[in-house]
Image: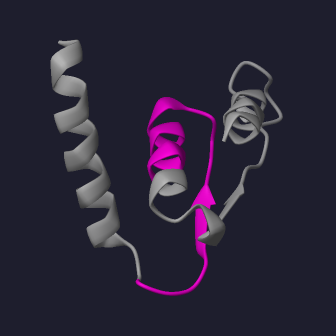
């Protein structure tokens, strides 16, 4: 399984790169969940200087993943 990670990462980065504009800033709605976190990592590898991530919390703490979003941003 670990041997397949580089090939998966290459395909993911290629797919994401094909979907973003060539110029300008990219706004990322970062919930802190798995999907948006993986996208944040991909964008940070493709064009880190162009990405602006933002998040909003939830009033129900059981649904609020903003602390996860903060961890992702801190790691990147």
Q: Identify whether 71 is placed above or below 39.
A: above
The image quadrant that residue 61 belongs to is top right
Q: Nearer the viewer, residue 29 or 4?
A: 4
Q: Position of residue 47 (x, y in %)?
A: 52, 65
Residue at 44% across / 49% down in the picture?
42
Q: Identify whether 66 is placed above or below 18.
A: above
In the displayed structure image, the side of residue 9 where residue 4 appears, left or right: left
Q: Position of residue 59 (x, y in %)?
A: 83, 34
Report the number of discs.
0
Q: Residue furthest top?
A: 1
Q: Residue furthest bottom?
A: 23
In the displayed structure image, the side of residue 36 where residue 62 appears, left or right: right
The N terminus - image quarter: top left
Residue at 24% across / 26% down in the picture?
5
The image quadrant that residue 76 belongs to is top right
Residue 43 falls inside the magenta stretch: no
Q: Position of residue 11 (x, y in %)?
A: 19, 48
Q: Nearer the viewer, residue 68 or 49?
A: 49
Q: Nearer the viewer, residue 53 or 12?
A: 12
Residue at 54% across / 48% down in the picture?
40
Report the magenta residues as a range.
22-42
């Amino acid at each position: 399984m670990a041997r397949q990670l580089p090939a998966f990462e290459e395909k993911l980065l290629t797919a994401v790169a094909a979907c973003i504009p060539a110029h300008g800033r990219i706004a990322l709605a970062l919930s802190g969940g798995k999907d948006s976190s993986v996208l944040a990592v991909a964008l940070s590898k493709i064009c880190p200087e162009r990405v602006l991530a933002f998040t909003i919390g939830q009033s129900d703490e059981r649904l609020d993943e903003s602390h996860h979003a903060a961890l992702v941003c801190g790691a990147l």
